[in-house]
Amino acid sequence: MSRLSEQIWADWIWFPEGHGWADLTDRDGKVFPKIQDLWATIPIALCFLVIRQIFERTVATPLASLLGVSNRQRVCAPSNPTLESYFCSTSKHPTQSSLESLSKTSGCSVRQVQRWFRRRRNQDRPNKHKKFREASWRFTFYLLAFFAGLAVLIDKPWFSDLKQMWEDFPKMPLLPSQYWYYMFELGFYVSLLFSVASDVKRKDFKEQIVHHVATILLISFSWLVNYIRAGTLIMLVHDASDYLMESAKMFNYAGWRKTCNFFFTLFAAVFIITRLVILPFWIIHTTWVYPLTLYPPFLGFYFFNGLLLVLQVLHIFWAVLILRMVVKFLPGNDIVEDERSDKEETESEDEDEGGEWKGKSKNGHIQNGHTPLNNNLRKRY
């Protein structure tokens, strides 16, 4: 194992010729990034999870009420062990043949079974309050992270001259501001992975997971091999549009249509400029093309840029979704709809509590004239 570790972390793999891990040894009062520093992101991530709970209860919830965020009144699916078992263990979207089979075993008509599954699926969908709380938390972090990153970078020479990010590589000393910027950014993305099971799941859920993992790998790797100057610029570019997207979501959930449309349009413009212009043609060009004029290519060079290309592919994917929303918005639609959202299923007959379910038990017989749904059928979330 020791020999394998030595081969994996060999200097020639991760550094250009003539350089290695020895260059990152602290000396002459200069501090360099170390692998053990990354362990600090775990307690930081846990702190973010705790702070998020406090923030959502003390700030996001009152703010939701202040902005007029209201949950849609939902109809709960009546208790039915047979359908519930199928819903939880087999599928939330039964096929036609399964509907007919469930109709026989549950004693309900096919239409009743279809309606039950629609209502049951809607029960699992997050309500507007939950979405608003999540969006407001991310908005707060991205906004603070963007301006903190701007403060860290604005006076640095590589902010205006990207080629400076490779000056004296890899012997560039670590600044305290860079350390905390990295730790908080990485800790936040780790916290997103921790909370992924409870967060709102959208249609691009898999792409979001890939994005989070690629981001964590990219930030961690850039820390290990002292690509910190490039890493801080990449994080700043990403944060530049994220808080605008979250603000548009917040106003969308609140029903502030004109404000939502304004922030969404601003977000779309900033996203395209930063993710499809600045990142590929300036930053990736400086990390992919320019270093070849200074050093022969090495494995770490390909690994770092490969992760950047993964992010760039995801940016193109999301840009397509954004442009689809812009196209819908331009003709004068009332509000921009998030293409990634799992929209709630509706049906007019669900508003009538005296429908087919009334007076029926799960085996299809009358229950002494009482409706199983009764007045408790509607439940506000």
Image (cartoon, rainbow, N blue to C red):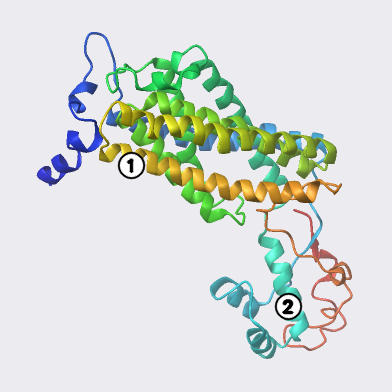
Direction front: furthest residue = 293
* Horizontal relation, residue 192 to residue 77: left or right: left
Which residue carries the number 1 mark?
Answer: 303
In which image quadrant can residue 220 be found?
top left
* Horizontal relation, residue 171 to residue 117: left or right: left
Near-viewer residue (25 or 278): 278
Dots 2, 1 in contact, CB < 8 A: no
* Horizontal relation, residue 357 to residue 217: left or right: right
Element type where label 2 sits in the image:
helix
Mark 1 Cα-neighbour bin, 10 Å: few <14, some 14–19, many ≥20: some
Direction top: furthest residue = 28
Give the answer, above or below, for where 236 lies relative to 203.
Answer: above
Give the answer, above or below, for where 348 lies relative to 369.
Answer: above
Could you say where residue 40 lies in the image, as x and y percent from the top left? 37, 30
Label drawn at residue 114? 2
Q: Earlier in the sequence, mark 2 or mark 1?
A: 2
Q: Amino acid at mark 2?
A: Gln
